[in-house]
Amino acid sequence: MTENTAASVVAAIEAAQAGYMSALKQAGSVWETRPAAGDGEEAWCARQVAEHIGGASLFFGARIAEAIGVPGPVPRRLEFASAADAATGTAEVHAEFATVLARVTDDHLAMDVDLPRLGKQTVGGILSIIANHYKDHANQINTLRG
């Protein structure tokens, strides 16, 4: 089994984010379309997904920055009028998040972080969650597109 390193988990996040951005850039036709069935996040349209992902990047970036003792982004609510706006805004938000990712070292991965809704996690665990979060929501947008 391959051991996670800061470089490997950051690379996984960047790859997942690229896949998410690809889906997002194609979401215009389903921007306000909700799936026929589903509850909670499963019932979101592409706009809601995009606003959630952008806000989550800021939230997670701020929490990781606080844990490792570096400056981080300020969480804020995002609103995107279109898929094109979301692609631009998400790229900007991800750049803020990436400044924190660039400061994560192997020594940080085992550090504990207490997150609302997710409870006690490690920095490495949070980074894995983030990569999967991007993948899950890219799949959600792709499913909306059919």
Image (cartoon, rainbow, N blue to C red):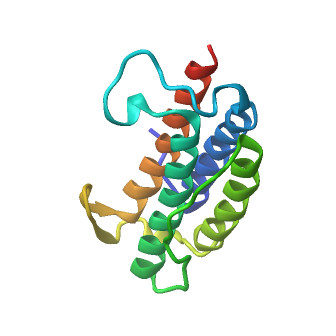
* Vertical relation: 93 (above or below) 2: below
Instruction: Name the spot of residue 60 as percent of width and height, x first.
Output: 45, 64
> Is residue 16 found left or right of 43 in the rendered image?
right
Instruction: Name the spot of residue 38 as percent of width and height, x first.
Output: 35, 22
* Vertical relation: 16 (above or below) 89: above
Q: Quadrant of residue 33?
A: top right
Instruction: Name the spot of residue 128 as percent of width and height, x first.
Output: 45, 49
Image quarter of the N terminus: top left
* Vertical relation: 68 (above or below) 43: below
In this view of the protein, which residue sits in the foreground, 67 or 106? 67
Image quarter of the C terminus: top right
In this view of the protein, which residue sits in the foreground, 97 or 101? 97
* Vertical relation: 22 (above or below) 145: below
Instruction: Name the spot of residue 126 as percent of width and height, x first.
Output: 40, 57
In this view of the protein, which residue sits in the foreground, 64 or 41? 41
Q: Residue at 58%, 41% (x, y): give it.
A: 47
Number of numbered discs:
0
Q: Residue furthest left?
A: 119
In this view of the protein, which residue sits in the foreground, 49 or 19? 49
> Is residue 133 found left or right of 12 in the rendered image?
left
Q: Residue at 68%, 38% (x, y): give it.
A: 24
Q: Residue at 37%, 17% (x, y): give it.
A: 37
